[in-house]
Amino acid sequence: MIKMENADAETLARSLIQEAYEKLKGINPEEALGKLEQALHADYTQQEALYALKCLNWWLERIKNLDNAGDTCDSYSRGSFLLSQWKSYYIFLELVGGAYDRCQYAIKHFVYALALQNYEDALADGLLRHDPELLEQIGRCYKGMGCYEEALNYLKQAARFKQEDAATISILADVYALLGETKAAKVLFREAFFIDPQRVDLENLESGLILSLAKRVSEMGYSGPELREWLPVYGALFGVFTVKRELKLAELGRLKQRIFDLESKLRGSPKEENILKPSLLNKYLRLIDHYEGKDNSGALIDEIKLKIKIIKPLIFERYMC
Protein backbone atom coordinates (compact mmCIF):
# COMPACT_ATOMS: atom_id res chain seq x y z
CA MET A 1 0.00 0.00 0.00
CA ILE A 2 2.87 2.34 0.87
CA LYS A 3 4.60 1.56 -2.42
CA MET A 4 1.40 2.35 -4.31
CA GLU A 5 1.12 5.67 -2.48
CA ASN A 6 4.71 6.50 -3.35
CA ALA A 7 4.07 5.63 -6.98
CA ASP A 8 0.94 7.78 -7.01
CA ALA A 9 2.89 10.69 -5.50
CA GLU A 10 5.61 10.37 -8.12
CA THR A 11 3.07 10.22 -10.95
CA LEU A 12 1.27 13.30 -9.60
CA ALA A 13 4.56 15.18 -9.24
CA ARG A 14 5.59 14.39 -12.83
CA SER A 15 2.21 15.51 -14.10
CA LEU A 16 2.47 18.78 -12.18
CA ILE A 17 5.99 19.37 -13.52
CA GLN A 18 4.73 18.94 -17.08
CA GLU A 19 1.88 21.36 -16.37
CA ALA A 20 4.44 23.82 -15.03
CA TYR A 21 6.42 23.59 -18.26
CA GLU A 22 3.29 24.23 -20.31
CA LYS A 23 2.54 27.29 -18.18
CA LEU A 24 6.06 28.53 -18.80
CA LYS A 25 5.67 28.16 -22.56
CA GLY A 26 2.49 30.19 -22.23
CA ILE A 27 4.43 32.94 -20.40
CA ASN A 28 2.72 32.29 -17.06
CA PRO A 29 5.74 32.03 -14.74
CA GLU A 30 3.85 32.54 -11.48
CA GLU A 31 1.45 29.68 -12.27
CA ALA A 32 4.42 27.55 -13.31
CA LEU A 33 6.07 28.32 -9.98
CA GLY A 34 2.94 27.20 -8.13
CA LYS A 35 2.80 23.92 -10.06
CA LEU A 36 6.43 23.17 -9.27
CA GLU A 37 5.89 23.86 -5.59
CA GLN A 38 2.88 21.53 -5.63
CA ALA A 39 5.00 18.86 -7.32
CA LEU A 40 7.64 19.11 -4.63
CA HIS A 41 4.95 18.98 -1.95
CA ALA A 42 3.50 15.82 -3.52
CA ASP A 43 6.93 14.18 -3.75
CA TYR A 44 9.71 15.90 -1.83
CA THR A 45 12.29 13.56 -3.43
CA GLN A 46 11.46 14.88 -6.91
CA GLN A 47 14.81 16.27 -8.07
CA GLU A 48 13.51 17.64 -11.37
CA ALA A 49 10.98 19.84 -9.57
CA LEU A 50 13.72 21.18 -7.30
CA TYR A 51 15.99 21.80 -10.29
CA ALA A 52 13.24 23.57 -12.25
CA LEU A 53 12.41 25.76 -9.25
CA LYS A 54 16.03 26.90 -9.00
CA CYS A 55 16.14 27.70 -12.72
CA LEU A 56 12.83 29.53 -12.79
CA ASN A 57 13.58 31.53 -9.65
CA TRP A 58 16.89 32.62 -11.21
CA TRP A 59 14.99 34.17 -14.12
CA LEU A 60 12.20 35.57 -11.94
CA GLU A 61 14.79 37.48 -9.93
CA ARG A 62 16.06 39.11 -13.15
CA ILE A 63 12.53 39.90 -14.28
CA LYS A 64 11.81 41.45 -10.89
CA ASN A 65 14.76 43.79 -11.42
CA LEU A 66 13.27 44.79 -14.77
CA ASP A 67 9.88 45.44 -13.22
CA ASN A 68 11.47 47.60 -10.52
CA ALA A 69 13.06 49.71 -13.25
CA GLY A 70 9.56 50.72 -14.37
CA ASP A 71 9.28 53.34 -17.09
CA THR A 72 13.02 54.00 -17.06
CA CYS A 73 13.48 50.81 -19.08
CA ASP A 74 11.76 50.80 -22.49
CA SER A 75 10.47 47.71 -24.30
CA TYR A 76 13.54 47.31 -26.50
CA SER A 77 15.86 47.56 -23.51
CA ARG A 78 13.79 45.01 -21.57
CA GLY A 79 14.01 42.50 -24.40
CA SER A 80 17.73 43.08 -24.83
CA PHE A 81 18.34 42.71 -21.09
CA LEU A 82 16.64 39.32 -21.05
CA LEU A 83 18.72 38.02 -23.96
CA SER A 84 21.90 39.38 -22.41
CA GLN A 85 21.40 37.14 -19.36
CA TRP A 86 21.98 33.82 -21.11
CA LYS A 87 25.73 33.71 -20.51
CA SER A 88 25.24 34.33 -16.79
CA TYR A 89 22.48 31.71 -16.74
CA TYR A 90 24.78 29.08 -18.28
CA ILE A 91 27.35 29.81 -15.59
CA PHE A 92 24.59 29.37 -12.99
CA LEU A 93 23.68 25.99 -14.53
CA GLU A 94 27.26 24.79 -14.20
CA LEU A 95 27.11 25.57 -10.49
CA VAL A 96 23.72 23.90 -10.03
CA GLY A 97 24.77 20.72 -11.81
CA GLY A 98 22.45 18.10 -13.23
CA ALA A 99 20.51 18.48 -16.44
CA TYR A 100 16.85 18.11 -17.38
CA ASP A 101 16.34 18.79 -21.07
CA ARG A 102 12.59 19.38 -20.95
CA CYS A 103 13.11 21.93 -18.18
CA GLN A 104 15.68 23.83 -20.24
CA TYR A 105 13.46 23.69 -23.31
CA ALA A 106 10.58 25.24 -21.35
CA ILE A 107 12.82 27.89 -19.78
CA LYS A 108 14.29 28.76 -23.15
CA HIS A 109 10.86 29.07 -24.75
CA PHE A 110 9.65 31.24 -21.87
CA VAL A 111 12.57 33.67 -21.92
CA TYR A 112 12.59 34.10 -25.68
CA ALA A 113 8.79 34.47 -25.79
CA LEU A 114 8.92 37.13 -23.07
CA ALA A 115 11.72 38.98 -24.87
CA LEU A 116 9.72 38.74 -28.11
CA GLN A 117 6.72 40.39 -26.43
CA ASN A 118 8.92 43.35 -25.54
CA TYR A 119 10.49 43.57 -28.99
CA GLU A 120 7.09 43.43 -30.67
CA ASP A 121 5.97 46.30 -28.44
CA ALA A 122 9.02 48.24 -29.64
CA LEU A 123 8.20 47.35 -33.23
CA ALA A 124 4.59 48.46 -32.83
CA ASP A 125 5.46 52.06 -32.01
CA GLY A 126 6.74 52.46 -35.58
CA LEU A 127 10.00 54.24 -34.76
CA LEU A 128 12.15 51.10 -35.07
CA ARG A 129 10.17 49.34 -37.79
CA HIS A 130 13.16 49.02 -40.13
CA ASP A 131 15.90 48.92 -37.52
CA PRO A 132 18.20 45.95 -38.36
CA GLU A 133 19.14 45.36 -34.71
CA LEU A 134 15.49 45.01 -33.72
CA LEU A 135 14.74 42.78 -36.70
CA GLU A 136 17.68 40.56 -35.76
CA GLN A 137 16.62 40.30 -32.13
CA ILE A 138 13.09 39.34 -33.13
CA GLY A 139 14.55 36.70 -35.43
CA ARG A 140 16.69 35.37 -32.58
CA CYS A 141 13.62 35.13 -30.35
CA TYR A 142 11.66 33.14 -32.93
CA LYS A 143 14.66 30.87 -33.40
CA GLY A 144 14.90 30.32 -29.65
CA MET A 145 11.23 29.34 -29.60
CA GLY A 146 11.72 26.87 -32.45
CA CYS A 147 9.73 28.97 -34.96
CA TYR A 148 12.32 28.77 -37.72
CA GLU A 149 10.29 30.08 -40.66
CA GLU A 150 9.43 33.25 -38.75
CA ALA A 151 13.04 33.55 -37.61
CA LEU A 152 14.25 33.27 -41.20
CA ASN A 153 11.95 36.07 -42.31
CA TYR A 154 13.30 38.57 -39.77
CA LEU A 155 16.94 37.49 -39.96
CA LYS A 156 16.99 37.81 -43.76
CA GLN A 157 15.74 41.37 -43.41
CA ALA A 158 18.41 42.15 -40.81
CA ALA A 159 21.17 40.54 -42.88
CA ARG A 160 20.44 42.83 -45.82
CA PHE A 161 21.64 45.70 -43.64
CA LYS A 162 24.38 43.73 -41.85
CA GLN A 163 26.16 41.85 -44.63
CA GLU A 164 29.54 42.16 -42.90
CA ASP A 165 28.34 41.14 -39.43
CA ALA A 166 29.55 37.62 -38.68
CA ALA A 167 27.17 37.24 -35.71
CA THR A 168 24.09 38.00 -37.82
CA ILE A 169 25.25 35.86 -40.74
CA SER A 170 26.03 32.88 -38.49
CA ILE A 171 22.59 32.95 -36.87
CA LEU A 172 20.96 33.15 -40.30
CA ALA A 173 23.09 30.19 -41.43
CA ASP A 174 22.01 28.22 -38.37
CA VAL A 175 18.33 28.78 -39.18
CA TYR A 176 18.85 27.64 -42.76
CA ALA A 177 20.53 24.49 -41.43
CA LEU A 178 17.68 23.84 -38.99
CA LEU A 179 15.24 24.16 -41.90
CA GLY A 180 17.22 21.62 -43.92
CA GLU A 181 18.54 24.22 -46.38
CA THR A 182 22.06 22.81 -46.18
CA LYS A 183 23.57 24.54 -49.21
CA ALA A 184 22.55 28.01 -48.04
CA ALA A 185 23.72 27.18 -44.50
CA LYS A 186 27.17 26.10 -45.69
CA VAL A 187 27.63 29.23 -47.79
CA LEU A 188 26.65 31.53 -44.95
CA PHE A 189 28.59 29.70 -42.25
CA ARG A 190 31.73 29.96 -44.35
CA GLU A 191 31.07 33.65 -44.98
CA ALA A 192 30.58 34.31 -41.26
CA PHE A 193 33.81 32.56 -40.29
CA PHE A 194 35.65 34.32 -43.09
CA ILE A 195 34.44 37.75 -41.96
CA ASP A 196 35.37 37.28 -38.30
CA PRO A 197 35.43 33.92 -36.44
CA GLN A 198 35.47 35.71 -33.09
CA ARG A 199 32.11 37.34 -33.84
CA VAL A 200 30.37 34.07 -34.71
CA ASP A 201 27.65 33.47 -32.12
CA LEU A 202 28.84 29.94 -31.34
CA GLU A 203 27.05 29.65 -27.97
CA ASN A 204 23.65 30.17 -29.60
CA LEU A 205 24.09 27.90 -32.62
CA GLU A 206 21.95 24.77 -32.60
CA SER A 207 22.25 22.93 -35.91
CA GLY A 208 24.06 19.62 -36.10
CA LEU A 209 25.99 20.91 -39.11
CA ILE A 210 28.06 23.30 -37.02
CA LEU A 211 27.84 21.62 -33.59
CA SER A 212 29.31 18.35 -34.86
CA LEU A 213 32.18 20.28 -36.46
CA ALA A 214 32.78 22.26 -33.27
CA LYS A 215 32.81 19.05 -31.23
CA ARG A 216 35.28 17.40 -33.58
CA VAL A 217 37.65 20.37 -33.51
CA SER A 218 37.36 20.77 -29.74
CA GLU A 219 38.36 17.11 -29.37
CA MET A 220 41.66 18.08 -31.02
CA GLY A 221 42.38 20.19 -27.94
CA TYR A 222 41.22 23.60 -29.14
CA SER A 223 38.93 25.85 -27.11
CA GLY A 224 37.86 29.47 -26.72
CA PRO A 225 39.10 32.00 -29.31
CA GLU A 226 41.53 29.43 -30.75
CA LEU A 227 38.66 27.01 -31.46
CA ARG A 228 36.81 29.69 -33.39
CA GLU A 229 39.82 30.32 -35.63
CA TRP A 230 40.35 26.64 -36.40
CA LEU A 231 36.68 25.90 -37.16
CA PRO A 232 36.68 27.39 -40.70
CA VAL A 233 40.00 25.69 -41.48
CA TYR A 234 38.82 22.23 -40.54
CA GLY A 235 35.35 23.02 -41.84
CA ALA A 236 36.90 23.36 -45.30
CA LEU A 237 39.25 20.41 -44.91
CA PHE A 238 36.61 18.03 -43.50
CA GLY A 239 34.18 18.81 -46.31
CA VAL A 240 31.69 20.74 -44.18
CA PHE A 241 32.17 24.12 -45.87
CA THR A 242 32.04 22.72 -49.38
CA VAL A 243 29.97 25.40 -51.11
CA LYS A 244 32.36 27.95 -52.55
CA ARG A 245 32.13 31.16 -54.55
CA GLU A 246 34.45 33.30 -56.61
CA LEU A 247 35.54 36.51 -54.94
CA LYS A 248 34.77 39.89 -56.43
CA LEU A 249 37.75 42.02 -57.44
CA ALA A 250 37.43 44.30 -54.38
CA GLU A 251 37.08 41.28 -52.06
CA LEU A 252 40.16 39.68 -53.59
CA GLY A 253 42.14 42.86 -52.98
CA ARG A 254 41.03 43.02 -49.35
CA LEU A 255 41.86 39.33 -48.86
CA LYS A 256 45.40 39.75 -50.19
CA GLN A 257 45.94 42.78 -47.97
CA ARG A 258 44.64 40.89 -44.95
CA ILE A 259 47.01 38.00 -45.73
CA PHE A 260 49.94 40.40 -46.00
CA ASP A 261 49.02 42.00 -42.67
CA LEU A 262 48.68 38.61 -40.93
CA GLU A 263 51.98 37.35 -42.34
CA SER A 264 53.71 40.49 -41.08
CA LYS A 265 52.08 40.20 -37.68
CA LEU A 266 53.01 36.51 -37.38
CA ARG A 267 56.67 37.32 -38.04
CA GLY A 268 56.58 40.07 -35.42
CA SER A 269 54.34 38.44 -32.79
CA PRO A 270 55.22 34.73 -32.45
CA LYS A 271 53.49 34.65 -29.04
CA GLU A 272 50.15 35.12 -30.81
CA GLU A 273 50.71 32.33 -33.29
CA ASN A 274 47.98 30.14 -31.79
CA ILE A 275 45.45 32.68 -33.16
CA LEU A 276 47.38 34.09 -36.12
CA LYS A 277 48.23 30.74 -37.74
CA PRO A 278 44.67 29.39 -38.10
CA SER A 279 43.47 32.84 -39.15
CA LEU A 280 46.11 32.93 -41.90
CA LEU A 281 45.33 29.35 -42.97
CA ASN A 282 41.66 30.30 -43.28
CA LYS A 283 42.61 33.13 -45.63
CA TYR A 284 44.96 30.90 -47.66
CA LEU A 285 42.23 28.30 -48.19
CA ARG A 286 39.83 31.00 -49.30
CA LEU A 287 42.40 32.26 -51.81
CA ILE A 288 42.91 28.73 -53.16
CA ASP A 289 39.14 28.43 -53.63
CA HIS A 290 39.20 31.62 -55.69
CA TYR A 291 42.02 30.46 -57.96
CA GLU A 292 40.80 26.87 -58.49
CA GLY A 293 39.45 26.34 -62.00
CA LYS A 294 41.08 29.48 -63.36
CA ASP A 295 43.51 29.27 -66.26
CA ASN A 296 47.22 29.64 -65.46
CA SER A 297 46.59 29.64 -61.72
CA GLY A 298 48.45 26.42 -60.87
CA ALA A 299 51.65 28.21 -59.87
CA LEU A 300 49.74 30.58 -57.59
CA ILE A 301 47.98 27.67 -55.86
CA ASP A 302 51.28 25.81 -55.41
CA GLU A 303 52.79 28.93 -53.82
CA ILE A 304 49.92 29.15 -51.34
CA LYS A 305 50.19 25.43 -50.55
CA LEU A 306 53.89 25.89 -49.80
CA LYS A 307 53.01 28.64 -47.32
CA ILE A 308 50.50 26.25 -45.69
CA LYS A 309 53.21 23.59 -45.45
CA ILE A 310 55.51 26.02 -43.64
CA ILE A 311 52.83 27.12 -41.16
CA LYS A 312 51.20 23.75 -40.47
CA PRO A 313 53.04 20.76 -42.02
CA LEU A 314 50.48 18.28 -40.67
CA ILE A 315 47.63 19.96 -42.53
CA PHE A 316 49.67 20.04 -45.72
CA GLU A 317 50.56 16.35 -45.47
CA ARG A 318 47.02 15.21 -44.72
CA TYR A 319 44.98 17.44 -46.99
CA MET A 320 47.18 19.22 -49.54
CA CYS A 321 49.33 16.46 -51.00
Image: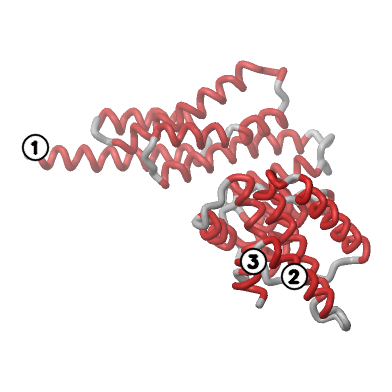
The amino acid type of the residue labelled 1 equals Ile
Q: Does dot 2 land on a helix, a strand or a loop? A: helix
Q: Give me the disc on residue 2.
A: 1
Residue 99 at x, y = what percent?
A: 39, 42
- Rounded to the nearest angstrom, the CA distance separating label 3 from label 1 is 69 Å
**Distance from the alpha carbon under mark 1 to that under mark 2:** 76 Å
Tell me the CA gap for discs 3 and 2: 9 Å
**Which quadrant does the N terminus fall into?**
top left
Circle 3/circle 2 CB separation < 8 Å: no
Image spot of residue 75 (x, y percent)? 71, 29
Which amino acid, mark 2? Leu
Q: Residues within 10 Å of mark 1 (few under 14, many from 20)?
A: few
Which quadrant holds the C terminus? bottom right
What residue is at 71 percent from the left and 34 percent from the top? 121
Displayed quadrant of residue 211: bottom right
Q: Secondary structure at mark 1?
A: helix
Say if residue 37 shows up in the picture.
yes
Q: Where is residue 18, by image quadrant?
A: top left
Mark seen at residue 313: 3
Answer few, some or many: residues within 10 Å of disc 2's Cα (few below 14, many 20 plus, some between 14 and 19).
Answer: some
- Left or right side of 285 for 145: left
